[in-house]
Image (cartoon, grey):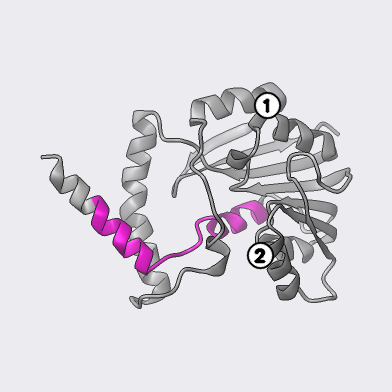
Amino acid sequence: MTTLPLRVLGALDRFNAAHPWDHNAHYHRWILRRLPRRFGRALDVGCGTGDLARLLAARADEVQAVDSDPAIVARAREATPATAPVTFTVADASTGTPAGPYDVITCVAVLHHLPFTEALTHLRRQLAPGGTLLVVGCARAQTIGDHLLAAVAAPLNAAIGWWRSRGRTVPRPPSMTAVTRPPELGFPEIVREARAVLPGARLRRRLFWRYTLVWRAEG
């Protein structure tokens, strides 16, 4: 009884490896829908190859984008037009971000690499009055709800990968090649610790092994 699910999971893993897509980029539109059409300064934490930073630059007067990986930052700079109001910096996301305040701070699939409470505290201090912090994060599966959501996400993930690749085997996108580590905190722990730092923060479990956090600083 236990070998069939393992075989199914193995088949899904092999299929997903042949038809990969960027789960983080999937939530970029979710982020943009929660932001005004124009704003002043933005900070993108863990910018990777700069896809989200470039989207923010279409609305912001200035975007500071940071990542701890020099090679990825170099790729981001190469892919960004010189006229775009984006500055890419190699920095520690939890302490070394360029000085705020910022009207918008985004953080996608980064917090599980950092001391969670310390990183959120740092970002809160960088946010301008009335500013918005948007997080797309990764949590460790712990509860029955987590495992049920993962069970729904697995075949849907394969279907989207197949549709995006039109059935062809494709190489893994460069933005997905950075070394990652599994999250240590489960979603209930994340909610508890986040709300201790960011009172009133709104958090939700999401598909594709992600959660979201929205917090607006008092104006």
Amino acid type of the residue that numbered disc 2 sits on in the rendered structure: Thr
Determine which of the numbered discs, if any, sits on residue 26 in the image.
none
Which sits in the foreground, 106 or 58?
A: 106
Determine which of the numbered discs, if any, sits on residue 200 in the image.
1
Amino acid type of the residue that numbered disc 1 sits on in the rendered structure: Gly
Disc 2 packing (10 Å; few <14; some 14–19; many ≥20): many
Q: Quadrant of residue 82?
A: bottom right
Q: Position of residue 161 (x, y in %)?
A: 39, 66
Q: Position of residue 91 (x, y in %)?
A: 77, 50
Q: Are marks 2 and 1 in contact (CB under 8 Å)?
A: no
At mark 1, the secondary structure is: loop
> CA separation, marks 2 and 1?
32 Å
Which residue shows up at 57% across the image and 41% down it? 212
Prevailing SS of the magenta stretch = helix
Which residue shows up at 50% across the image and 37% down it? 139
Quarter of the picture containing the C terminus is top right
Residue named by callout 2: 49
Looking at the image, can residue 201 be seen? no
In the image, residue 101 sits, relative to residue 197, either above or below, namely below
- Count of residue discs: 2
At mark 2, the secondary structure is: loop
On the rendered structure, is 16 left or right of 185? left
Residue 10 magenta-drawn?
yes
Q: Position of residue 111 (x, y in %)?
A: 62, 40
Q: Position of residue 6 (x, y in %)?
A: 21, 47
**Where does the magenta region start and end?**
9-33
Give whichever of discs 2 and 1 has the lower sequence position: 2
Looking at the image, can residue 21 be seen? yes
Quarter of the picture containing the N terminus is top left
Q: Nearer the viewer, mark 2 or mark 1?
A: 2
In the image, residue 42 sits, relative to residue 216, either above or below, namely below
Residue 201 magenta-drawn?
no
